[in-house]
Image (cartoon, rainbow, N blue to C red):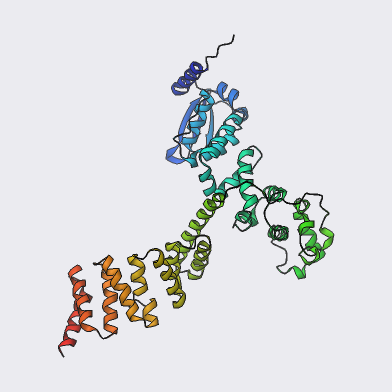
């Protein structure tokens, strides 16, 4: 009977790693001041990791009989996990951030640690599927770099099959590596009209040849052959027989269309709807951030474009509505500007900022002032001040509204309230003096 003493062996090797007795390899991990040197042993690395075995074969010993390997693009946290696995054969992922675990998977693949690849993939899929969906773009691009991450590839393939627009409508689509596009085209359960698949494939092919004329009607035979050459590995996976209408009406002439013996695409695939919702939620968040950045930098058209896209995904997001409303207002599109805060206030009726913004009749370009809707302006500003009574900006806006309406005593009262908040406001002091003199006449 064979008895295994692996636990004690693992413990002894862990002590060897800690003490670095008789080390003959230094692995420098990280960059700049954060570099950490791991003192390790070539006999362990050669036995346990093909990546380091190959590395060591190309490096000569220095005068102290030590070889040095530099890993500047690797995080110390990830390498610490890997080197302990190499020495001790143990790993614990329960209290590690999902992004670190994902990086660990990528590095394990680079180091060709097959046992670790399988374990980390399974752990991510069972415990961090939500994180994988929220970071889908990064995940699918990494999973298709080679065929070692098959479980992760299948996870991505299931989502892409049911929600292909995640890829086809993404900013990265035109720069998608050919192997990923071919993988997608091979999916027999890809749930997209074949005509659209064809059009997207052509669009991708054209993007690979930026020298092609912009107008396909002016293409020469040589131009078509250039495109055909770029698509030669993709065309065999198009189901031409599922495209409605003649293919001759599309970009490429009939002579490049090859007969297909592939099966029809099957739309049935067991994926729950929340797979897409998490991916789309992350996409909406990124669009909101982009839209707000554009607004702050004065690029209002771009801001509205991004915020509109985000609202197509999450139509009741109050922040996106407020931000788009502000962009419309800065462009003097007052009707559109009013619609967004109206909807935002249906979602968050006590949002003092939105009430103040909608009701501001003084700052140039604000909605109600331009539309001469002073009573509505007063209602919004008054409600805003009920929520935040000491907001000097809202008081200033309401004071200006009262004055425009000829309600000078109420305007004076708001000026006095503003001066209670900031007694040294020189502008408010002058305005109160002028208004007081006016009322005495």
Q: What x and y, as percent, mark residue 161?
A: 65, 50
Kindly tell me whether residue 332 is visible in this rendering: no
Kindly tell me whether residue 185 is visible in this rendering: yes
> For residue 60, what is the image quadrant?
top right
Position of 198 compared to 390: left or right? right
Q: Name the quarter where the C terminus is drawn.
A: bottom left
- Residue closest to the eye, 201 or 264: 264
Q: Is residue 83 above or below residue 434?
A: above
Outermost residue toward the top? 1
> For residue 440, what is the image quadrant?
bottom left
Q: What x and y, as percent, mark residue 27?
A: 51, 31
Q: Residue at x 76, y 65 (%)?
A: 250
Q: Residue at x 66, y 50 (%)?
A: 177
Outermost residue toward the left? 440
Q: Across the whole image, how many numbered discs are drawn on residues?
A: 0
- Residue closest to the eye, 167 or 364: 167
Q: Is residue 283 above or below residue 407?
A: above
Q: What x and y, as percent, mark residue 91?
A: 50, 29
Q: Name the quarter where the N terminus is drawn.
A: top right
> For residue 15, what is the image quadrant?
top left
- Residue closest to the eye, 406 or 135: 406
Position of 419 compared to 47: left or right? left
Q: What x and y, as percent, mark residue 314?
A: 50, 60
Q: Is residue 331 above or below residue 406?
A: above
Q: Residue at x 60, y 22 (%)?
A: 47
- Residue closest to the eye, 227 or 363: 363
């Amino acid at each position: 009977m064979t008895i295994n003493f692996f636990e004690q062996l693992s413990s002894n090797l862990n002590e060897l790693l800690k003490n670095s007795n008789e080390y003959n390899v230094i692995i420098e991990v990280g960059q700049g001041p954060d570099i950490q040197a791991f003192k390790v042993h070539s006999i362990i690395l050669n036995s346990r990791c093909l990546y380091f075995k190959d590395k060591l074969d190309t490096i000569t010993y220095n005068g102290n009989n030590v070889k040095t390997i530099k890993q500047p693009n690797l995080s110390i946290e990830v390498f610490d996990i890997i080197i302990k696995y190499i020495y001790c054969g143990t790993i614990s992922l329960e209290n590690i951030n999902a992004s670190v675990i994902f990086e660990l998977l990528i590095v394990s693949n680079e180091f060709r640690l097959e046992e670790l690849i399988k374990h980390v993939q399974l752990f991510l899929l069972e415990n961090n599927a939500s994180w994988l969906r929220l970071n889908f773009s990064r995940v699918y691009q990494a999973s298709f770099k080679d065929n070692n991450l098959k479980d992760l590839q299948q996870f991505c393939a299931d989502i892409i099959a049911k929600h292909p627009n995640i890829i086809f409508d993404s900013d990265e689509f035109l720069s998608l590596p050919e192997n990923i596009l071919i993988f997608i085209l091979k999916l027999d359960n890809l749930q997209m009209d074949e005509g659209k698949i064809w059009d997207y494939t052509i669009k991708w092919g054209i993007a690979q040849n930026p020298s092609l004329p912009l107008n396909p009607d002016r293409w020469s035979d040589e131009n078509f052959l250039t495109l055909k050459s770029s698509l030669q590995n993709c065309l065999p996976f198009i189901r031409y027989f599922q495209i409605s209408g003649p293919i001759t009406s599309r970009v490429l002439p009939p002579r490049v269309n090859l007969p297909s013996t592939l099966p029809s695409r099957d739309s049935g695939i067991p994926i729950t709807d929340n797979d897409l919702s998490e991916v789309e939620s992350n996409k909406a968040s990124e669009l909101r951030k982009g839209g707000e950045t554009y607004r702050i930098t004065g690029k209002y058209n771009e801001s509205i474009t991004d915020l509109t896209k985000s609202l197509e995904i999450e139509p009741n997001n109050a922040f996106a509505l407020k931000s788009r409303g502000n962009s419309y207002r800065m462009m003097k599109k007052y009707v559109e500007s009013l619609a967004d805060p109206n909807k935002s206030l249906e979602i968050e009726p006590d949002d003092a900022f939105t009430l103040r913004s909608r009701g501001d009749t003084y700052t140039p370009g604000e909605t109600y002032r331009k539309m001469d809707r002073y009573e509505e302006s007063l209602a919004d500003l008054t409600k805003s001040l009920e929520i935040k009574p000491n907001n000097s900006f809202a008081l200033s806006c309401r004071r200006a509204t009262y004055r425009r309406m000829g309600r000078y005593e109420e305007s004076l009262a708001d000026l006095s309230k503003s001066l209670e908040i900031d007694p040294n406001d020189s502008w408010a002091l002058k305005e109160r003096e002028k208004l007081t003199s006016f009322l005495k006449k």
